[in-house]
Amino acid sequence: MRLHWFRSLLAVIGIIIGVVAIASMGILGNSLVLAISDSLSTVGDSIIVTPHAGTRMGPSMGGSSELITERKVEQIRRAVAPDITIPVYSGTARMRIGTEDAVGVVYALKPDDIPILLEVEEGTFLRGSSGAMAGAKFAADNNLKVGSRITIRDKGSLRVVGILKERGMGFDINPDYGIVVEDRWYQQAYDQKDYDMVIVKVKDLTRIEQTKEAIEKQLNRRETEVDVIDTKAILETILTTFGQISTFTTAIGGISLIVAGVSILNIMMMSVTERIKEIGVLRSIGTLRKEVRSMFLFEALILGLIGSIIGGVLSIFGGFAVSLVMLQTTEYLFVPSSLVYIFYGMAFGVGTSLLSGLYPAWKASNLNPIEALRHE
């Protein structure tokens, strides 16, 4: 290895690239799964009940006239007790903010239910029917602050009493791009008593399927009146999909390590060819076949260890770079489930090196000593 240092260096570089590729892609994939999981974790404990005729996003959207009546809400509440039942009104509205026009989603909930689903970034929760809470993105896009006025066309004016904390993507409600008002104001403004959806917050996730079945049994005994969606199942499906994407990206990184393994195989074969006479001398003075095999395997192992250790160190910087570029955050880099990919990459690097050295070592140990001594 010392005599042919440049050739050995190229093999080591190949291993380094492979280890960095595997670890970096693994870290990126795992960070993506964790980011999605954190974004959706707030709704993973929910069951969403919507009218079977189709979810109707408020009067301004048109569509089905079938909604969830107060009687059905009470049936759901009895079926899921002691879990929390939250009826929701939802619609879209044209608004005027200052001199600008805007369109946003309007959600209406009972004041006591709002803190269960949402958090306040600035200001306070709703205290009266003349107030509204603005979603984080909606407030940023329209320069809304606590105290700002929102005029909903033909419905009246509302004062912003709070800015909601960004909630991220959800399967129940997405208030980031809209406003939240009190249910009494919505009933009067839209002349609507029945609800667009009902959200059930399940305290014990192990009972979520049982709770879902209880709702189905209570409301859909004779005919299907409502659709019941289990967000935990949706969340698990999404995370499984992203997990498969993570595995795929890691496999792509593994291709470069396989290429590096072919390079080591080539180098070891060249080493065997160049040292045939040396092997013949060793065998003629009594060196055992297993000792010859060990000599070449150790050479492959050393190349793999050097490349894997350097690659493992560089993988931290590689994972940092891809996380920053692709996700704009590195908060998931140093969690155990991400760091383990560095060790996976290193182990794969060492393993690939040893596998690449097996055939050359076997060939060297099985050379005929007399023929090896005659080799020129």
Image (cartoon, helix red, strand yellow):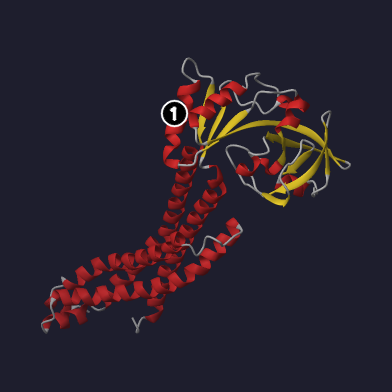
Q: Amino acid at mark 1?
A: Glu
Q: Residue at x 19, y 79 (%)?
A: 279
Q: Along the horizontal axis of the image, is 282 left or right of 223?
A: left
Report the quarter where the C terminus lies: bottom left
Farthest residue in the top direction?
222
Reading the image, the residue beneath label 1 is 213
Q: Residue at x 23, y 77 (%)?
A: 295
Q: Is residue 84 above or below residue 167?
A: above
Q: Residue at x 62, y 46 (%)?
A: 168
Q: Tell me which corner region of the image, top left, top right, bottom left or bottom right, holds residue 274.
A: bottom left
Residue nearer the viewer, 264 or 246: 246
- Residue 163 visible? The answer is yes
Residue nearer the viewer, 106 or 124: 124
Q: Position of residue 296 (x, y in %)?
A: 25, 75
Q: Is residue 170 above or below residue 165?
A: above
Q: Tell me which corner region of the image, top left, top right, bottom left or bottom right, holds residue 50.
A: top right
Which element type, helix, strand or loop, lies under badge 1?
A: helix
